Image (cartoon, helix red, strand yellow):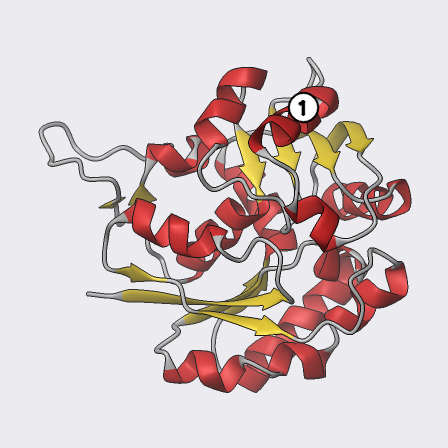
Amino acid sequence: MTTTVGLLYPGHAAEDDFPRIEITLDTDIRLPLFSTEVAEDSYRRGSLLESGAPDRLAEGTEELRLAGAEALVWASPGGSFVYGWAGAHNQIATLARSAGLPASSTGFGFVHAVRELGASRVAVGAAWPEDITVLVAEFLVAGGVEVVASHSAGLATDAEVAGLGPEQVRELALAADHPDAEVLLLPDAALHTAVSIPELEEAVGKPVLTASQVSVWEGLRLTDRRVWAPTLGTLFAARRPAPGAVEPKGIEVRE
C-alpha cells in the first residue's frame, strides 16, 4: 500500500534532495512537494517568520491533499525554529487544522529523531548566521536535547547554502563536531545531503541528522510507516528487517 507524505518547502534551493530520497527508498513511498512562496531569500529573523506564517503554509495544502498526502511536513527548520518551541507547536497545529491531516515540521523532526537514536547530546553545524543558530539551540533545549557545541558558517541566503558542494558540507560537519556529542545535526534545508549521509557519518564517527533526511523520516513517523534504508544514514538503519528477509533499498518495518 502506498504511503504518501506531503512536503511544504520554502522557495527553491535543495528541494531536489527529496526525489533522490524517494528513489533511494525504492518502495511504495511517495513524497510530493509544494514550494511555498518566499518573499526574500534571507536568513533574517523577520524573513523566516514570514516564511512560516499560516497563509504561506496553507498555499500548498490542497494540492498535496489531491496528491494523496496522508501527512504533511513543513520542511523548513529555520521557518519553525524561529517561532520557538510553543510558537512552532501553534504553527503546526494551525497547519493540521487547515489541512485536515496530521502535520509536523523538520524542527520537531530533529527532536524526535534524536530520541529515536537513544541520544540526548548533540552538536549543531549550521550554515546560517550565528543569531539564527542560537534559535536552533534554544529550540532543541526546549525539546529536552542538550546542545554541547554549535558552529555557524555565517552564510546569508539559501542560494549560497545550496551552492555548497559535498566537500564543503563535509568541512562544515567536521568543524561542528564535538567529542561529547552523540549525534551531529546539520539543520539547514538548503544543504544538499541526500546522497552523502553515510560519508558524513564515517567522517565524524557518529550518526548525522540532516534536514531533508529528517523531514522524510518525520512524515513517515506520522503515518506509522517504518523503512529500513541505511543509505540514508543511521536514522533509517536503526530498525533492521527480520533475519532472512529480502533487503531492497527500503524495507518496511511496522511495529
Q: Which residue is mark 1?
A: 171
Instruction: Give x and y (percent) for residue 62.
Output: 49, 86
Give residue 210's quadrant in the image: top right
Q: Residue at x 78, y 66 (%)?
A: 87
Looking at the picture, which amino acid does disc 1 mark? Glu
- Whether residue 131 is visible to the viewer of this picture, yes or no, is yes
Residue 87 lies, with reference to residue 114, above or below; the image says: below
Q: Nearer the viewer, residue 123 or 46?
A: 46
Q: Residue at x 19, y 65 (%)?
A: 1
Mark 1: secondary structure: helix
Is residue 9 found left or right of 199 in the rendered image?
right
Instruction: Give x and y (percent) for residue 9.
Output: 59, 65
Is residue 123 found left or right of 74 in the rendered image?
right
Q: Residues within 10 Å of mark 1 (few under 14, many from 20)?
A: some
Q: Nearer the viewer, residue 8 or 147?
A: 8
Residue 119 lies, with reference to residue 189, above or below; the image says: above
